[in-house]
Image (spheres, grey):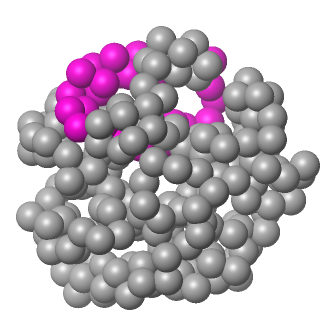
Amino acid sequence: MKVSVSYLKSAFSKEETLEKIEKSKADFIHVDLMDGIFVEKNNLDVKETISLLKKHQKPLDIHLMVENPLKVIEELECLKPKTITLHIESKDVEENLKSLTNKKIQKGLAINPETDLSLLFPYLKEIDQVLIMSVHPGKGGQSFLSDTIQKVRELYNIRQEKKLTFQIAIDGGINEETASLVKDYVDILTSGSYICMSENFEEKIVKLKQIDK
């Protein structure tokens, strides 16, 4: 199992948190960016984000919770992210996916808990990742929404039936217990406070990576 670590909520400073993630067995650094419009919280300080991550070694998995992602994509291109994930509920999805294709950045689409999975169907052949939100986006430390399990299972079955290649990631309230509920259907566990509010990042990450064994 691959693990993407979000530093949105941590017991440590952003700098120390990122240093701990870099030294760990995490597969990705998960970067949550919010504009105060698409979700209530606003941490969309692109200059700060670039400054924090410009020397990153681990692949960046950027999650944009913003109304109009195109400008942000342009600004973050300099970080050479592996994946940028947009929300299916945001504006100009096709245009933004085309921008990512042109920049040779892997394309992800996120979907909120209350959004019907069918909105993703037109894009499943062209994207690299689907991020299933198992909490309402915009706040760290929320509890896992159990209704998400059925959504993940359905998406997994669609991928199998249609022989598609996108990765399935899940984000929100992920810990050992909740990861075990979805381990058969996902490729990437995105976890934040479970890891970053602990003293031992590596121990938590290893437990998640071994969840499917």
Task: From the viewer's perspective, tell me whether residue 169 is left or right of residue 113.
Answer: right
Residue found at x 52% / y 21%: 49
Rendered-image quadrant of the C terminus: bottom right
Query: Which contiguous range is marked in magenta?
Result: 54-79
> Percent position (x, y) of residue 180?
64, 83
> Percent position (x, y) of residue 203?
86, 59
Depth check: 205 or 35 in front?
35
Furthest residue toward front: 40
Depth check: 32 or 103 in front?
32
Rendered-image quadrant of the N terminus: bottom right
Residue found at x 48% / y 12%: 47
Whether residue 167 is visible to the viewer of this picture, yes or no, is no
Q: Is residue 84 magenta?
A: no
Residue found at x 38% / y 22%: 76
Q: Is residue 154 above or below residue 66?
A: below
> Percent position (x, y) of residue 120?
18, 65
Q: Is residue 45 above or below residue 184?
A: above
Task: From the viewer's perspective, tell me whether residue 134 is left or right of residue 164.
Answer: right
Residue found at x 49% / y 83%: 146
Task: From the viewer's perspective, tell me whether residue 146 is left or right of residue 202.
Answer: left
Number of numbered markers: 0
> Percent position (x, y) of residue 164?
25, 71
Whether residue 29 is visible to the viewer of this picture, yes or no, is yes
Q: Is residue 91 above or below residue 19?
A: below
